[in-house]
Every structure is written in structure tokens, then in C-alpha cells.
Image (cartoon, rainbow, N blue to C red):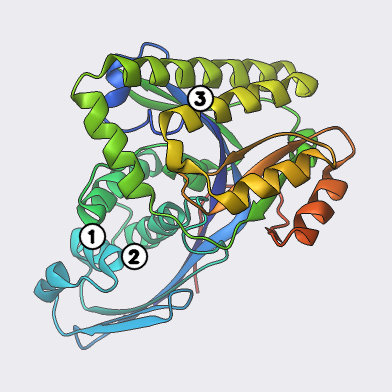
Amino acid sequence: MIIEAQAPTRIDLAGGTVDIWPLYLFHEHAQTINFAIDQYARCRIETRDDGRFVFESKDRDMRVEIDSYQALRDDEALSLISKLVYFFHPEGGLNITTDCMAPAGAGLAGSSALNIALCAALNHLTGSRYKQERLPFLAANVETQVLKVPAGFQDYFPAVYGSVSNVKLRVEGVIRSEVPTDLDELESRIALCYSHAPRNSGANNWEMFKTHIDGDPVIFAKFERICDTAVKIERALQDKAFDEIGAIFAEEWASRRDLVPGISTEFIDELIVKAKQHGAEAAKVCGAGGGGCVAFYCEAGRKAEVEQALQDAGGQVIPYKIARQGVQVREI
């Protein structure tokens, strides 16, 4: 049997880092807003009869061979694949090949999208024991095992559902709903650029997590501002008030820089200055920062001009479309 799956990555608009349990329990209006893009993470699973496991990551140029199911627990080379296979416990061995269109460490949640693609494919292989709405929670728990620090929830929902997501983080649970808006207009207003510098989101998030849990009132107030900005972004999207979003976008970036001073780099700051000279209203680093991709909110009709300026300044513009669909699985 051969099973293939793909899941979209995402651009986060507002509310990141608050999605880590239990931080959101201390903020009444905690939510994150993001949208899925067609920079897909893909996997291919092929069953084999000898009980062996062969995993290959094309984008990381890595390959591992594992002789038994029990040995999956100890693999550190491609640990996400190994731990997911160990959890789903398929009969027999597997060949698994993975790839991701988004650059590694880009801040576009490529590992989370791959996680969802693998979860969906392995779930299909093992008889669809879990409903689709359970996949984000399974994926978050396994990724926490891999990272060895708490994983946030927001990145799994665009991979599962596509489109624009509002991930509400409440006492009763984490609940995703679609944000109704003009997807074509949103797409036309946000440019995406890679800074050629991968970052470590787990390390950045973990430092903030510890400070928050320690009860630092300054950090708490900064998280409150981030929560407020996410509420504003959602309202503006629903109202299709796209000319108001640039100022809110700038507010989000200011709050995030205040929260994590090292979130940007000298080159990213140079890109932002150049983009603002050519029609960008605001910008923010995708994900937890320290490198990776930057999203630029553009004045109406000036996205192409912003992209050309970024390219001329040495950035890598990533063309994209908003992914209307989430994870897709097919059996060949």
C-alpha cells in the first residue's frame, strides 16, 4: 500500500506564543490568527513486509534505517517521524519519504505541517482510529516529545483546515473557527520574504514560557497586549477593513519586539526599512523570530513593488497563494 499526504504551512498574523499551555489560561481573550499557504509539507508512506523502517527527509538530506518497532523510540536523527510511527504502531515495516517546500527554520510552521501530514497518513494507514479534529492535539503532544519543551497549538490548525483560522484558547479547550474575510484581498496585501537565516523557535518560546510561569508582571502585561492585538486583527479581517490592518500589524510587531528583543536581525531590519520605502505599511517576523521569514503588509496595489525591493535588497521572496484546503490524503 502507498499513501501520500500534504498539508499547508502558514503565515501567523497575531497572537503567537500565547498558544502554549498553560500560558493562555491566564489571559481571558487569548487567541491566535493565522492563514494557510501553499508551501506544502508532504509525505509518502509505503508498506513493507520485513518489519524494518526506512525514513528519508529530502529537504534535510537525511536517511535512517531502523530494524525494529521498539528501536523507533531511540532514534534522534529523524525523531519526529520515528515517534509518530511509534505512536500509531502500524503492522509491519514502512518506507517513509518526506519533503517541505518552505525553507527549514523559516518560521512558517513547516515541521508542524509535516507533523499533520504524517499524522493524517499514518492514521489512514492504521484504520482512521482518530477523527480529524483530534490530529492537532496528537501532533502537539508528539512534537513536545521531540522538542523536549512545550509546543504551541496554533500551527497545527492551518495545516488541518486551511484558509484563515482563529484559534481560541480557553479553559474549555482549544477551539478553531474560520475567519470569514476576502481571501484574495488578504493575499494581495501580504508579501513573504525569507531572510536566509533559520531560527530556533523552541528555544525562544521556552525562555518566554519560563519567565511567564515565574509570574513576571512585566511579561504578563506584554502578553496581554499581544492578545489584544489578535482580537483587533480578527475584527478587521471580518469587517474587511484592510486599510486598517497595517497599523494593527505594526502594533503586533512592536509588542513582539518588546517581548523578545532578539526576535529580529540586522538584515531583517534592513529589509523592513527598504520595504517601507516601496509601499509596505508594516512587517513582522514569522514565528518566534531570530531569523526566518518576514511578512510585509502592503498598501493596496503595491505588493509587487515591495517584493521587487526585497529581492533587490538580497531577500528571497516566496510567492504563495492562500491554501483553501487543509491536509489531503490519498491512497495509491
Residue 125: image tag? 2
Disc 2 marks which amino acid?
Answer: Leu
**Against 29, is 129 above or below?**
below
Q: Nearer the viewer, residue 298 or 71?
A: 298
Image height check: is 256 above or below 74?
A: above
**Residue at 53%, 49% in the rendered image:** 265
Which quadrant of the figure contains the N terminus?
A: bottom left
Q: Which residue is mark 1?
A: 88
Are discs 2 and 1 less than 8 Å apart at CB? yes
Q: Quadrant of residue 260?
A: top left
Viewer-side residue, 115 vs 94: 115
Between circles 3 and 2, the one closer to the viewer is 3
Q: Residues within 10 Å of mark 3 (few under 14, many from 20)?
A: some
N-term-proximal mark, 3 vs 1: 1
Q: Earlier in the sequence, mark 2 or mark 1?
A: 1
Q: Secondary structure at mark 2?
A: helix
Please give the count of numbered marks on the rendered protein: 3
In-front residue for pair 203/41: 203
Residue 129 locus on image (x, y percent):
28, 50
- The kind of residue tagged 3 is Ser
Residue 51 falls in which quadrant of the image? bottom left
* Residue located beneath label 3 in the image: 255
Q: Residues within 10 Å of mark 2 (few under 14, many from 20)?
A: many
Q: Can residue 75 be seen here? A: yes
Residue 140 placement (x, y as % from top left): 30, 45
Q: Is residue 69 left or right of residue 54?
A: left
Q: CA distance from mark 3 to mark 2?
A: 44 Å
Q: Earlier in the sequence, mark 3 or mark 2?
A: 2
